[in-house]
Image: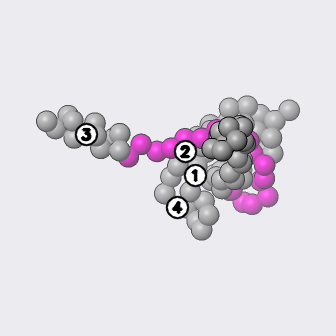
């Protein structure tokens, strides 16, 4: 019985991860990452791109505009920052 409780608690508290492109690095220890989601329009059945901007914590200021990064959900770090940097998938050319 205790095994199912721990499995359920870890499944329930799973943190979201997203992959996106860095679009801004002007702030100290913060980067703005644009996440693009493709969704079907309910009425017209056309694929629509939705862009969401996330404020990401970048402790060492290593990110540059154009980098592809993977970010994870975290506790609130400031007024807008709720994501942290997991890894840099691809550097900008």
Badge 4 local density, few (<14 within 10 Å), some, or many (20+)?
few
Q: Is residue 79 magenta?
A: no
- Of residue 44 and residue 66, the one placed in the foreground of this image is 44
Question: In 3D space, how far apart are the residues under numbered discs 4 and 1 (Cα atoms)?
Answer: 8 Å
Compare marks 2 and 3 and give the one earlier in the sequence.
3
Identify the residue position indicated by label 1 in the image: 83
Compare marks 3 and 4 and give the one earlier in the sequence.
3
Compare marks 1 and 3 and give the one earlier in the sequence.
3
Quarter of the rendering containing residue 3:
top left
Mark 2, secondary structure of its residue: strand
Q: Position of residue 75 (x, y in %)?
A: 49, 57
Identify the residue position indicated by label 3 in the image: 6
Identify the residue position indicated by label 2 in the image: 72
Q: Which residues are magenta?
A: 13-31
Q: Position of residue 90 (x, y in %)?
A: 73, 31
Badge 3 local density, few (<14 within 10 Å), some, or many (20+)?
few
Mark 1, secondary structure of its residue: strand
**For residue 34, side relative to residue 72 (left or right):** right
Residue 76's label in the rendered image is: 4
- Residue 75 in the image: above or below residue 85: below
Asked whether disc 2 touches disc 3, contact meaning CB atoms under 8 Å apart, the reply is no
Q: Quadrant of the C terminus?
A: top right
Compare marks 4 and 1 and give the one earlier in the sequence.
4
Asked whether disc 2 touches disc 1, contact meaning CB atoms under 8 Å apart, the reply is yes
Question: In 3D space, how far apart are the residues under numbered discs 2 and 4 (Cα atoms)?
Answer: 12 Å
Q: Quadrant of the N terminus?
A: top left
**For residue 13, side relative to residue 70 (left or right):** left
Is there any visible trace of residue 38 in the rendered image? no
Query: Which residue is at the far bottom?
Result: 79
């Amino acid at each position: 019985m205790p095994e199912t409780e721990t499995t359920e608690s870890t499944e329930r508290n799973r943190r979201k991860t997203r992959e996106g492109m860095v679009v801004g690095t002007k702030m100290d220890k913060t980067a703005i990452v644009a996440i693009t989601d493709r969704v079907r329009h309910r009425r017209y059945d056309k694929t629509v791109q939705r862009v969401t901007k996330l404020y990401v914590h970048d402790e060492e200021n290593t990110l540059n505009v154009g980098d592809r990064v993977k970010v994870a959900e975290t506790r609130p770090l400031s007024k807008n920052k709720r994501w942290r940097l997991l890894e840099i998938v691809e550097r900008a050319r």
